[in-house]
Amino acid sequence: MITESDERRSSVTAITSTTPGTEEHGTGSSPPPGGALARLGRWTATHLRAVLIGWAVVLLVFGVFAPRVETRLAGAGWQDSTSQSVAARNLTGRYFAGLGASALQVVVVDHGGALAADPNAQAVISEVTARLRADPRVSTVVPPTPGMSLSQDGRTGIVTAGAAADPNAMVRAADSLAKPLAALGRPGVSVALTGDSALWANFNSANHRAMLRSELLSWPVTLVILVVAFGSLVAAGLPLMLTMVGLLVAAGALVIATAIAPVSIWALNFALMFALALGIDYALFLVIRFRAALERRQVQPGDRVGAAEAVAETMDTAGKAVAFSALTVLASLAAILLVPSPAFRSMALGIMLAVVAVLAATLTLLPAVLGRLGTRINAGRLRLRRRPAGHDPAGHHPVNWLEGRMHAWGRWLWRHPWPAALGALAVLVAAASPVLGLRTNMPSITIVPPSANARLGYDQVTAAFGPGAPGTLQVLVPASQQPAAMATLAHTPGVAAAIPGPTNQGWTLDQVVPTTGPSTPATGATIDRVRQVLPAGSLVGGAAAENHDLQHALSSRTPLVFAVLAALGFVLLLVALGSPLLAAGGVLITGLSVAAAFGVARLIFQDGHLSGLLHFTPQGFVDAWGPLFFGAMVFGVAMDYTLFILSAAKESYERHADPEHAMVGSVAASGRVVISAAAIMIAVFLTFALSGPLAPKEMGVILAVAVAFDAILVRLVLLPVLLRAGHHHAWHTPRWLARVLPSVRFSH
């Protein structure tokens, strides 16, 4: 039985102590078997070869597919698949040779005179037409047409290539054709590929390169922080092992998934980010607890039995917290699946695959390696700073310097909870207040570099045809209603021109040119107005309409997604902790930190503060995917930290019902994990913030600010104060609820 002296140990050692019986010193009789995770840990720790063979098979299977991930993933999918604009694109592809949103537009500009009067320009147009017709992804080629795709001065013409393939293939076509087409230009005559497919090709290329560059820059910083956080070179390599396993499995699984449905190329980038973040979190949490178990059991070098029991104890406590943490992250990401967009769903799928792979490796491969390492987990240990006494405040076992500082902070919070809590709340509320004026929209052409071919062509079209020309709408009207529709559109506010088009299968394909640019709110209002005045059954499509519909889908579903996030987070915390107070408090405080992150995002990216320092031009809004997608990611990571803090507190409270002991001890033991993991994630995210393109910059700032707010103000101030304020009531479970909930214990 646990002795009374054991119960009086300091919070630092008590929270990491899970000794179930008399101390075995690594060689005594086996302790009680514990739960399923304890048995799993004990088995893996003593069957390293079987575990390695199993993982070798898994990695071989997925590794066969992983090298093809870059070429198999899709570059499009930024759409609301249930929208009217996508229905219009599908009909255009079926009946009008794909002359819709996915069509390629090649801008030919004669800088010396009219295209028709220049033999060089005519030769260029002929060569462009031949090059496009030779591509199997092009259905038809339409030359510059007066009154539609030839400017009034005759100097700028648009050669349009219909889409014979799906949007993802057309993005790849734009990527492969851009340079060959540009090379067809001659002195005084320029050629630039533009249009929606070209825009997404440039967007993917520029941002993918920037993210890879940022990831490479982040690795040295990550390695340094890992060595400092783990305190030894051997232990610092463990999260990298989990990251590599998670990324390889996710990459192979994504390639396999492309056989079912297109998967966004961004899924791989986000899978890498989460594989690294969770690999660090889970490895750090388990290694700290494993070291404490080794020390308490006085396991000696070469003592395999003692090491296996330390692994079993670690898995029965910290392993259970990791499992609940992963479930919470998966639930948060699953909420994104409510958005009917292939890009968002596949990105969420990529992250979820990485989470599952990292979790599986954490619960099997990591304990197997820890069991074999035993006391060698401390090999290559660094002595960055020595404690004067070398013992914890109660005079028992030595503790990490950071744990000592966290222990002192926890004790101070217990004595002075309200000044710290009010200060943290004031900061979060002040940061969150600007979110009330947050505006979102799909990105404008400025999302790609000024030198990108899509942007060059966009600027040329705007200069020659007017600001609304790049956002020309494709309007499908029942053939019998075309005259009435054209008459109505001619007097519709926001419409610069309505151009009747061909008829096929009872439909007419007409062109409507707005008076304003594609990404402006005015054009969104024009699209809504056109849909209202057109005859029943008409469809409005085009790139601008698809962006407008996706932006509407994101903004309309954001409240639903966050409601689902809150509900799932509450249920999972309730099941894990059995405390309605802590479950509700954890969700509410996490929501406040997410709001604070987007309040800062509004000040920076919408209002333009710090734009000079970060080297970007503000768009006047935050990209529409930010609140929903990044918000779900932030919520998942925040709940990950919440589980670490509160599970450690519950473990202590289960052994000894002392609220102060539980609160101070959880801050001391889990605070180190939170601080170290947050430092790495902030460093990684800030490398994205320093990259060139706006999209990764926006992502990096939002995620870095969110992690900083959550780690410092929420997990190390507000959650501990919630435990302090709740006292014994924080752990109370109503009788009726106890009969419903499963019994989950975190003590060994």
Image (spheres, rainbow, N blue to C red):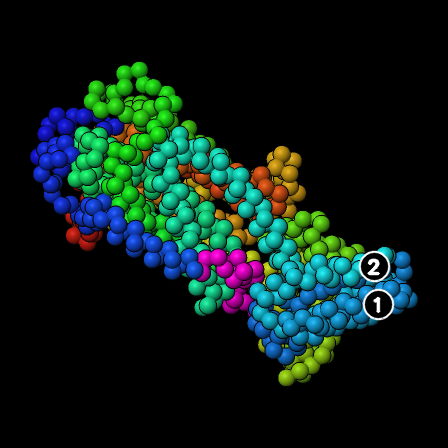
Q: Residues within 10 Å of mark 1 (few under 14, many from 20)?
A: some
Residue type at tag 2: Arg
Task: Please report contact status of discs 2 and 1: CB closer than 8 Å, yes or no.
Answer: yes
Q: From which residue to which does the magenta span run?
A: 65-84
Q: Which residue is mark 2?
A: 186
Residue at 24% across, 41% down: 371
Residue type at tag 1: Ala
Could you tell me which secondary element the residue under label 2 belongs to?
Answer: loop
Please identify the quarter of the rendering in which residue 392 is found: top left
The percent position of residue 391, horizontal first and vertical second, equals 25, 20
Please identify the quarter of the rendering in which residue 479 is found: bottom right
Residue 463 seen in the current view: yes
Q: Is residue 194 above or below residue 316?
A: below
Report if residue 284 lies within the magenta region. Answer: no
| Viewport quadrant of the N terminus | top left
- Total residue callouts: 2
* Left or right of 478 on screen, residue 274: left
Q: Which residue is mark 1?
A: 123
Please identify the quarter of the rendering in which residue 586 is found: top left
In the image, 256 versus 475, the foreground residue is 256
Q: Is residue 301 above or below residue 575?
A: above
In the image, 356 versus 8, the foreground residue is 356
The percent position of residue 542, horizontal first and vertical second, equals 64, 66
The percent position of residue 463, horizontal first and vertical second, equals 79, 56
Mark 2 or mark 1: which comes first in sequence? 1
| Viewport quadrant of the C terminus | top left
